[in-house]
Image: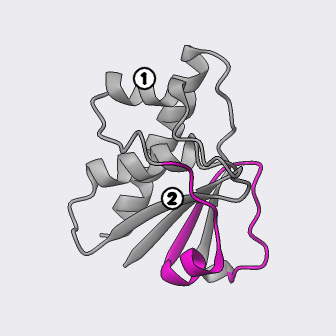
Amino acid sequence: MNILFVCRYNRFRSRVAEAFFNYYNKNKKIHVKSAGTNVDQLGFPIMSGAREALKKLNIPCDLEMGAQQLDSNLINWADKIYVVADDVSLEDIPSKKTIQFNIIDAWTNESVILKTIKSVEKSVKEIISSLK
């Protein structure tokens, strides 16, 4: 099974979801990627606040990988697409393939970043539990 996490820029929520999924998932037959719907041409890596928070939580993440743009190849690759954003809608993708988690894009300070990360972690745990 292939799972794709999507947010707007692929610099925070979807990247954190990918990191948590890789950390908690024990089923090696499930592969995961993340992407953004609005990635700039520079493809910036994960935002520094998320990077620091993941380090503090000891969650491994490819911190240097640049942001990845959502495209038809990734959509076709994915068996399930989890939108971990309240500001992204994938209306043109079949609903049976897409599940929406309305997680706000809040990264103004460390406490807000940690709250968002905990929301992402909770959603990922729900996903993993539902796949058993």
The colour scheme used here is: one colour
| Magenta part of the chain | 66-94
**SS for callout 2:** strand
24 left or right, relative to 127: left
Query: To which residue does mark 2 refer?
Result: 34
Q: Nearer the viewer, residue 85 or 36?
A: 36
Would you identify the image quadrant in which residue 115 lies?
Answer: top right
Q: Nearer the viewer, residue 47 or 112?
A: 47
Q: Nearer the viewer, residue 78 or 69?
A: 69
Residue 63 in percent (x, y) is at: 40, 39
Residue 56 in percent (x, y) is at: 33, 21
Question: Image point 51% across, 59% down: which residue?
Answer: 34
Mostly what secondary structure, the magenta segment? loop
**Residue 52 versus residue 8 in the image, above or below:** above
Disc 1 residue crowd, few under 14, some 14–19, many 20+, Cα 10 Å = some
Q: Amino acid at mark 2?
A: Ser
Indicate yes or no whether the magenta region holds residue 44.
Answer: no
Query: To which residue does mark 1 refer?
Result: 52
